Amino acid sequence: MGRFICATRSHISIEFDKGRIDDWCVYITYPDGKKIAPTDLEYFSRLAFLSSTYTGAVIYNHFVFFYNLTTAQVDMSVVNLIKQISNYYGDDAAEIELWFLVIYAGMIAEENKKFAVLKKRIKRLGMHQLLIQNFVPSEAATFSKGKKHTELDIEMKKYNI
C-alpha cells in the first residue's frame, strides 16, 4: 500500500510505494485510476519544453528554492510552497506543479535510499544539466548512470551543487 504525499490541483495523487529496489518509488495516480512511476526522461522532456516559454533559468531557480528546503521527510509547507510557485506559470501551472511535486518526492526518496551517497544532489545535477547547461532530456536523464559517486561529486562541485 502506497504512502500518500499529496494531490495536485488536477486531482493527481503523488505517493511513495514499492519499486524494483526499495519502498521509495514515486508514483502518480491519475483521476481515472491509472498509476505510473514517472521517469526522469518524462519530466525532463516536459520541463525542457516548458523552458522554451519560461526559460531554463526561471524554472531552475524555482526548483532550487524548494531543493534547499528538502529533507528526508515530506514537509507540507514545502508542498504548499511548490503549489504557490507553480502559480507563476499561468496556463501551465498545473503541469509545473505536478512535475515539481514529483521531483520533490524524488529528492525525498534519494534522501532515504539506504546506500545513496549523493542523495538529493543527483536530482539537482540533472536539473542543472537540463535547464542551465542545455543538455537534451535523454542526456540529463542518463548522465549519472554507471558513473561512480566520486566522479559525479567532482562534476557537482563545478556548479556548486
Image: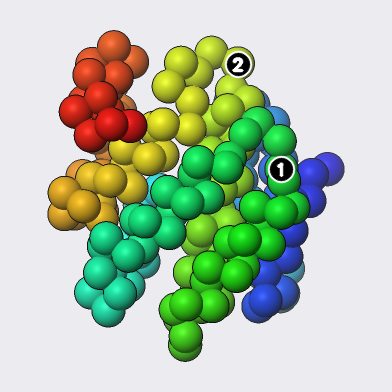
Q: Position of residue 47 (x, y in %)?
A: 35, 64
Report the disc number at residue 26: none
Q: Position of residue 49 (x, y in %)?
A: 28, 71
Residue at (28, 31) in percent of width and height: 160
Would you call the spot at circle 1 few (<14 residues within 10 Å), some (14-19), or many (20 or more)?
A: some
The x and y percentages for residue 19 are 62, 35
User: Which image quarter holds the N terminus?
Assistant: top right
Vertical side of 83 occupied by 102: above or below: above
Q: Secondary structure at mark 1?
A: loop
Q: CA distance from mark 2 to mark 1?
A: 17 Å
Name which residue lies at 43% across and 54% down: 63
* In the foreground, 142 or 91: 91
Q: Amino acid at mark 1?
A: Val
Q: Earlier in the sequence, mark 2 or mark 1?
A: 1
The nearer-to-camera label among 2 and 1 is: 1
Residue 14 vertical placement versus 11 (above, below)? above
The structure residue drawn at horizontal position 25% and vertical position 69%, both measured from the top left corner, is 55
Q: Which residue was labeled with disc 2?
A: 114
Residue type marked 2 = Lys
Instruction: Give the structural element (helix, strand or loop) at label 2.
Output: loop
Q: Quick check: 22 above or below 87?
A: above
Q: Residues within 10 Å of mark 2 (few under 14, many from 20)?
A: few
Query: Which residue is at a point 47% across and 87% down the rendered structure image?
Result: 91
Instruction: Choose top left, top right, bottom left or bottom right for residue 57.
Output: bottom left
Residue 74 tag number: 1
